[in-house]
Amino acid sequence: MLIPLTDLETAYDRNELSDKIEPLLNYDDKLNSALILVNIWHTRQISAHHGYDASQDILALIIKELLVYVKTDCCLLRTGNHEFALLIQNIKNAGHCQLALNKIIRDLNNKPLSIGKFTSKTKMSVAAALYPLQAITAQSLVQFVEIAMNQSEISNVSSVMYSEIMSERIIKRLQIESELDVAIQNKELEVWYQPKINSQTGTIYGVEALSRWRTRNGNFISPDIFIPIAEERRYIFDLTQGVLNTAFRNQKEWMAMGLNINMAVNISGKVIDDDEFVDLIEHCCGIWETAPQHITIEITETAMMNSMEESLNKLNILKKHGFLLSIDDFGTGYSSLEYFKTLPVHEVKIDKSFVKNMITSEDDMNLVSMMVGLAKNFSLKSVAEGVEDSKTFEALKSLGVDRIQGYYFAKPMPEEEFLTWAEYYLTNLEIDNFS
Ligand code: C2E
Ligand code: CA
Ligand code: CA
């Protein structure tokens, strides 16, 4: 039998863990060993608020609780500052193992633990994988349980049993992460443009720059997938810098051709939080000698939530320097009227989820109408995105929406295609259809 954890100072790495558990794994057709990772995550906060010693005392209490599960041929090892690996035996199948995980969570999660006068409730997540039902080596068992723990973090659930689908998903994600990093560094991402049309005159008010990623095998991966990954992996700053440089360069070239239009760029909350954010915008603008008055920075309401005051300061600086600001996906975030009043914006973009059904849904029509009215009352311009047909366009025009964006006019296009489209559109524009 392996001696249960007694040394609180040592943390076994993944290789050491697999060496330690290997002798305990018996190949059996009917019964499995379950490797469980236990991640205690509130001790970080205890350490921040009450000091390192307090967090270690609480951890010692948790270890005592965990030792209850350690029977013959089981083991409990420390695998990180706040993480433990528990190996238990005689598990019939994944369902049985899930019950064991549920029991640990029921027994220990939210359990109040006290040291002196100070009481703290345990916050933990657990994940498990089985040998030999799922993994047939100690090494893969360790790898699978880590994948399950990763899944618990991504989906924010406290107990996760490994499954094969997870492995495929995570391997795919890891592959995307590394390919994306290379693509950004090699400047392989493209910028496509979608026009914003002035709903009263029909002229092209501007374009929105949208990132496009074509992988080596020629497939496009949606920004809805790669932007969140770029944010998580901290590639978003470099990605944004690439988009800004391409967009401002193109805008300058278009201006020389007589196409003088606004350029809107999407800025993620992670970029706003960066200390270099204001410099990034101004620097890129400086390189291409773009006038800030011709740039719109699109931000979502949620992008501001992290550090509201700091973000507001930065946006106010940009506003003062002449940049235009737009609230993207308006209506889907935390918009309170108070908050709306304090944002230094010029434009609101009504989210496509409201626009899409406004002809068939009275509720959506009312909401769009309310948002257009709200923008007017605050002297802001309104944009409706996701306009796909003439009925929606006509309805928006009569509600007084200022700008229209959507497949009804044009999808996002590569630069050349956009220029061809713009030339054709402007030559055939029938002003009579508007106003
Ligand atoms: P978004 O900023 O709300 O951009 C509008 C999205 O709606 C775009 O999706 C556009 O292609 C799509 N769209 C436009 N008109 C229509 C329409 O009529 N019908 C429908 N069904 N969709 C329409 P896309 O290009 O896939 O981008 C998705 C999101 O990814 C963007 O949403 C934005 O949040 C993000 N994104 C794209 N490029 C960048 C970027 O360079 N930086 C950052 N931070 N985010 C970006
Ligand atoms: Ca946008
Ligand atoms: Ca949007």
Image (cartoon, helix red, strand yellow):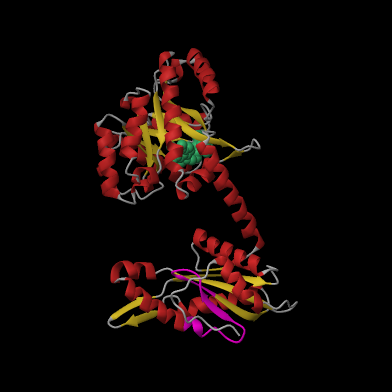
Q: Looking at the image, which residue is at 32% across and 75% down?
A: 54
Residue 84 appears anywhere in the view? yes
Which of 284/347 is in front?
284
Name the quadrant of the C terminus. top left
Q: Nearer the viewer, residue 426 or 19?
A: 19
Answer yes or no: is residue 359 visible: no
What range of the chain is rendered magenta? 65-85
| Residue 417 quadrant | top right
Residue 326 occupies quadrant: top left
Question: In this picture, is 398 found above or below 40?
Answer: above
Q: Is residue 170 magenta?
A: no
Return the residue nearer the eye: 204 or 139. Answer: 139
Residue 329, position in %: x, y? Answer: 42, 42
Residue 229 placement (x, y as % from top left): 50, 48
State whether residue 277 is above or below residue 5. above
Q: Quadrant of the N terminus?
A: bottom right
